[in-house]
Image (cartoon, rainbow, N blue to C red):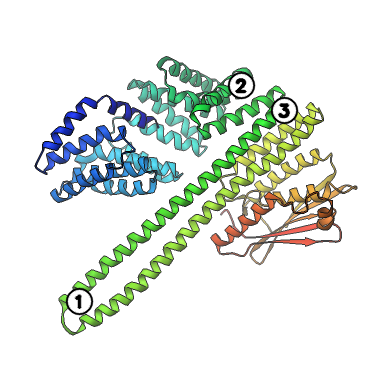
């Protein structure tokens, strides 16, 4: 966003020159390298001024075709990069953009005299991989850039690397590269970058426990934004500042920046920043003892977070569909080239075998084409399933947090502020653990057990110690080596508590057990509640279904697709209570 803004400002200042340049191009009659360079210069100075102009693709393709006819590598490479920019930024097709960027890189990496162009192309490749959360690939691109002496803006590269490490929660590495970026930005006298770096650095330092340094950089960023009137950074800087001040226990300033960030967002509609500001403001209200507003604000945060997750899921699947079709078309096109070569070679070899060779070649071609299509389809389906699984894991967390918030609401209604405060403290720990695991496909069984213990301790408090629980792990299982999908049992435990034990007069018991059976991990939730039959009779709405259980069953179905296993969920009605057996493929951390 920052680089785009700077480019736009640069282009705007060149309008008079652009008119003159356009006249020169229109009157230039020879399609030589000078002609190509004029067109490249025109694109560089005007394209970002009119990103909605649909003729840019044709304009750049004309430059590319002339460059190819002239065998002019500079023109070819820059045109591919420009087509990548159009796909990436203007048409919102990052994977299509990546394809063009890679073609550009393949041209420029061959000759050191093009290194200055390699820097821009590699930056674009790194940014797309960063957006797609392909962090290892993005880091490779950005770290490669640091080896080029032609890279005179290494502070920008350091900034991107710091962002990646921050997203990966590698806080010390992130701080190291932000500091390097800050030195470079200050040497180059770039207030926009200095303010942005200090905003991010302040939050990362605070999260890492360096409260004094974090507060200093946060205030430095806010001062620069005021001095230079950097409106593009004001809202995210206010959101970060709210979190920094909250962690420094300055509740008044935390509330000021969180509410002001939300007010600014009323006209900007930046949903991601709004989501963060709402989470911080909910914590501010909780610290103030205003639990009713804390609950209401956090519910808004959860609803917004859930909608963003669904939007991201749809976008990611759409991108995978585009990539799948493109990969399949390229593979089939390559096979067609190979088939034509085979026919040509056969005709050169001549004679009697030509017809037979053509027939055999065609049959082999069709078989290979079908195999490629099936392979690409299987690969695509696996990627989509992985995306859907990620979305379901993320949806599980808002659902789970929302239910926990209802418990705090119960205390607020009863005006039991001390219990609300104690409960909120335990809930904060549980929320932190839950969100830390939200992006992980698997966690250690021991970690998941610790998470379940915290959850059940909170629920015991909510239901006035109306039940006890035990957790049993077979002696032949290594809980420090076995991995499981995070929170896979939580919805079933929740169901046992809410619909089984809470409606029972006598104290109840939940037994959670883990054992190995035929290379599967059997995870059981066994309760002595009133059972499903009586639970349905007691419900106001017999059709009421647990959202969490539905999500978990969908998660297991997708895991079966991805790992080609037969995980199951079995519900067993007992004389007294219910048992759930969840079977999962046995997996190990090492």
Q: Is residue 325 left or right of residue 333?
A: right
Q: How many marks?
A: 3
Pointers 2 and 3 in contact (CB under 8 A)?
A: no
Can you say which quadrant of the picture contains the C terminus?
A: bottom right
- Contact (Cβ within 8 Å) of mark 1 with mark 2: no
- Residue 550 coordinates in the image, percent (x, y): 67, 54
Label pair 3/1, CB-CB below 8 angstroms: no
Q: Which marked residue is nearer to the observer: mark 3 or mark 1?
A: 3
- Asked if one can make out residue 131 in the rendered structure from this viewpoint, the answer is yes
Q: Nearer the viewer, residue 560 or 307?
A: 307
Residue 589 in the image: x percent, y percent?
A: 57, 53
| Mark 1 vs mark 2, CA separation in Å | 78 Å
At a point 47% along the width and 25% down the height, the residue shown is: 199
Q: Is residue 332 above or below residue 39?
A: below
Q: Residues within 10 Å of mark 1 (few under 14, many from 20)?
A: some
Quadrant of the rendered structure where residue 263 is? top right
Quadrant in which residue 192 is drawn: top left
Tell which circle, 2 or 3, labels the residue nearer the N-terminal end: 2
Tell me the residue that label 2 is attached to: 255
Percent coordinates x, y for residue 153 in the rendering = 31, 30
The residue under label 3 is: 291
Q: Nearer the viewer, residue 527 or 171?
A: 527
How far apart marks 2 and 3 lie (CA) works out to: 15 Å
Q: Is residue 7 left or right of residue 444?
A: left
- Give the residue pinned by disc 1: 346
Q: Position of residue 243 (x, y in %)?
A: 57, 26
Q: Dot 3 lies on which element?
A: helix
């Amino acid at each position: 966003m920052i680089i785009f803004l700077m480019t736009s400002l640069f282009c705007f200042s060149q309008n008079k020159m652009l008119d003159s340049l356009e006249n020169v191009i229109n009157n230039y009659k020879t399609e030589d390298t000078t002609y190509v360079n004029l067109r490249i210069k025109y694109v560089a100075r005007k394209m970002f001024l009119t990103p909605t102009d649909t003729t840019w693709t044709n304009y750049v393709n004309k430059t590319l075709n002339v460059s190819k006819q002239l065998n002019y590598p500079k023109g070819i490479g820059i045109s591919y990069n420009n087509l990548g920019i159009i796909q990436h930024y203007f048409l919102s097709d990052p994977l299509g953009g990546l394809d063009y960027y890679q073609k550009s890189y393949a041209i420029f990496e061959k000759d050191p005299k093009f290194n200055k162009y390699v820097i821009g192309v590699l930056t674009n490749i790194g940014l797309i991989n960063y957006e797609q959360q392909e962090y290892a690939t993005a880091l490779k691109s950005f770290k490669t850039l640091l080896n080029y002496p032609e890279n005179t803006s290494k502070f920008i590269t350091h900034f991107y690397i710091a962002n990646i490490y921050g997203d990966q929660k590698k806080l010390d590495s992130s701080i190291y590269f932000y500091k390097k970026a800050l030195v470079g930005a200050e040497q180059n006298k770039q207030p926009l970058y200095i303010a942005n770096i200090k905003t991010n650095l302040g939050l990362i330092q605070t999260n890492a426990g360096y409260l004094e340094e974090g507060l200093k950089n946060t205030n430095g960023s806010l001062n620069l934004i005021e001095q230079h009137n950097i409106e593009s950074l004001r809202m995210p800087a206010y959101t970060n500042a709210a979190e920094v001040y909250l962690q420094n226990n300055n509740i008044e300033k935390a509330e000021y920046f969180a509410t002001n960030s939300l007010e600014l967002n009323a006209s900007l509609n930046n949903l991601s920043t709004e989501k963060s500001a709402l989470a911080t403001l909910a914590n501010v209200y909780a610290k103030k003892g205003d639990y009713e507003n804390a609950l209401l604000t956090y519910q808004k945060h959860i609803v917004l977070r859930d909608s963003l997750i669904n939007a991201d899921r749809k976008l990611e699947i759409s991108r995978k569909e585009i990539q799948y079709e493109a990969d399949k078309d390229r593979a089939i096109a390559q096979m067609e080239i190979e088939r034509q070569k085979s026919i040509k070679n056969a005709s050169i070899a001549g004679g009697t075998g030509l017809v037979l060779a053509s027939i055999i070649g065609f049959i082999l071609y069709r078989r290979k084409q079908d195999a490629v299509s099936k392979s690409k389809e299987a690969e695509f389906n696996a990627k989509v399933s992985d995306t859907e699984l990620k979305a379901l894991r993320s949806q599980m967390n808002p659902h789970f947090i929302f239910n926990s918030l209802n418990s705090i609401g119960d205390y607020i209604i009863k005006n039991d502020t001390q219990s609300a405060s104690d409960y909120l403290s335990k809930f904060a720990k549980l929320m932190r653990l839950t969100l830390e695991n939200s992006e992980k496909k698997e966690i250690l069984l021991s970690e998941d057990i610790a998470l379940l213990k915290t959850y059940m301790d909170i629920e015991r408090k909510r239901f006035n110690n109306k039940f006890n629980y035990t957790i049993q792990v077979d002696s032949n299982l290594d809980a420090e080596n076995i991995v499981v999908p995070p929170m896979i049992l939580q919805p079933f435990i929740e169901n046992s508590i809410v619909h089984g034990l809470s409606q029972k007069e006598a104290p109840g018991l939940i037994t959670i057990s883990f054992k190995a059976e035929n290379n599967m991990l059997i995870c059981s939730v066994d309760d002595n509640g009133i059972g499903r039959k009586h639970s349905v009779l007691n419900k106001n709405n017999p059709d009421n279904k647990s959202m969490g259980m539905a999500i978990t069953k969908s998660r297991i179905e997708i895991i079966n697709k991805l790992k080609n296993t037969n995980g199951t969920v079995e519900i067993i009605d007992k004389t007294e209570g219910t048992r759930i057996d969840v079977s999962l493929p046995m997996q190990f951390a090492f």
